[in-house]
Image: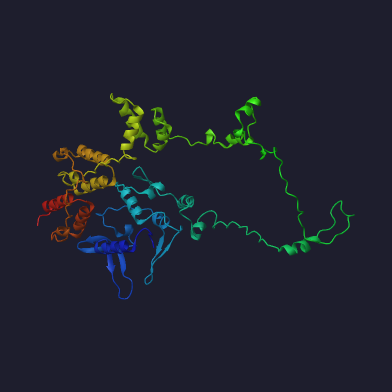
Amino acid sequence: RFDPSLSDSAAARALIHLAKSPWVSVAPRLGRKATYTPTWGTVHGSPCPWDLQAACLGRPRHIATLRLDQRLLDVCMGRLDPHPDHPAIARRYLATPLLGLRDIGAYTLALAGLPLPSPRLDALHLVVHGQPCPVPDEATILAIASQHAAHTLTEDGWRRTPFGGPPAPQPTDSGQAIFLVPPGQVGPMIGGRFGDLTGHAAEPEAASVAAESLKAPIAVDAPGSHGIMNQEEENPTTRTRAQRTASGGGEDIPLRHRTAGRNAPSQADTPALSESAQLLLAAGVRHSVAISLAARPVAQVTRVIAQARARADVRDLAAWVVSALRDLPAVDAPQAPERRLSALPIYQHPDLTDEQRDRWIYRFRAVTTPAEQRAILARLAQEHPSDHLDAPLPPIDALPAVPEPLLSALPIYQHPDLTDEQRDRWIYRFRAVTTPAEQRAILVRLEQEHPV
């Protein structure tokens, strides 16, 4: 597949949409693949195909174009070799392409001054701060791709590098097998193999026998040694007070009592307290209670302690703080995000041309936060002042109790006075919005500009 990120259904829909547009001429053939010839649109009612022998491929003067660097397709995606009968073959220098068709379109829009966010273009430094950058040479692109584990060079790609081929695989040490010898064969196998050892030549030869370990008696520690107490010694706790007084009141402490503190956990082994627990301890909360509330957010603990200290009726600061924290949830509820704004002020602007309106819509859709959208609308009000821009902006996510269904694009498809190019432009505007109010504004503007 030329673009792995594109599904088969999406590719089929895109091909059908392209075949209906005036930018390609389709010639079906019975029993074989159809022929797709790119065109420059319709000129005087007839398609104007590309002419490979003419200058600029026979492009008419009234059509503006943007020329892309061929390395964007050949190196970053792959070279497509078509076949009249069989599926086309994609030849790549990389196992997975660096860019997709969506990224190629985003780079084209950036050349036209309409940048769109694309993480792949940002990673390759092809678009920096919304401005397109020149495509580097082939060696630089392959060098950047080889530094990432997600992209591996193919054999054709390695031949394009100074190395001339893929690196040789590292030799692996297979090791040697381990043999288990029965105990009865250990003696005969080892005994007669070695010669006389140094300093033992005069010793008489002995028959080879299996080695045996001598049975050694088990040593029993005597009482009173190595910290073992005499079991026959009377228990010091059962001695009478007179016996303890007669001996001067002093007695030997057993070793097991003297060494009992050696296994006690040291202070270094105790886990470090969290910042929330430290704040609670500073407020006078007991250690065990502070440990149980150590997972609370620091902001929540700080806020509760500040509220307790600000109240004049709080007598026990620690008790009030613990009671308030136990009544609160373990994690603060996240705040509702600010709603995005609507693009209606751009669609309803009376002084914008079609090209200017499309450019402003692209800018508005490229951002993702309400602050950025508000900045774009403020800039629109500065460059193209209008009375309706002073009205409050409706939020795009403000939905009624019963959601209003989206409108249909049939009035655009059934309009009798629109050309194919105009209909595609209006359909694109209609599909770019997401709320019925914006769709209704587009249909009203269509009725004003092209009355039936």
The picture quadrant where one finds residue 44 is bottom left
Please give the name of the residue rendered at 75% of the width and 50% of the height, measured from the top-left corner.
217
Pick the front one: 8 or 242: 242
Q: Nearer the viewer, residue 29 or 396?
A: 396
Q: Is residue 330 above or below residue 304?
A: below
Which residue occupies the foreground of this view, 293 or 391?
Answer: 293
Point out residue 302 in the picture as x, y percentages from the top left corner: 35, 31
> Which quadrant holds the N terminus?
bottom left
Report the colour scheme. rainbow
The correct choice, above or below, for 358 with respect to 93 in the image is above
The answer to which image quadrant residue 249 occupies is top right
Furthest-right residue in this view: 202
Quarter occupied by the C terminus: bottom left
Residue at the extreme bottom = 31
- Which percent across, then down, holds residue 58? 30, 59
Tell me if I can see residue 49 in this picture: no
Position of 334 with respect to 143 (left or right) is left
311 horizontally vs 194: left or right: left
Count of numbered circles on the image:
0
Residue 281, image x, y percentages: 41, 30
Q: Residue at x 37, y 48 (%)?
A: 119
Instruction: List x then y, in percent, for residue 237.
Output: 59, 33
Q: Residue furthest left?
A: 452
Q: Is residue 111 above or below residue 330?
A: below
Which residue: 49% across, 60% down? Answer: 156
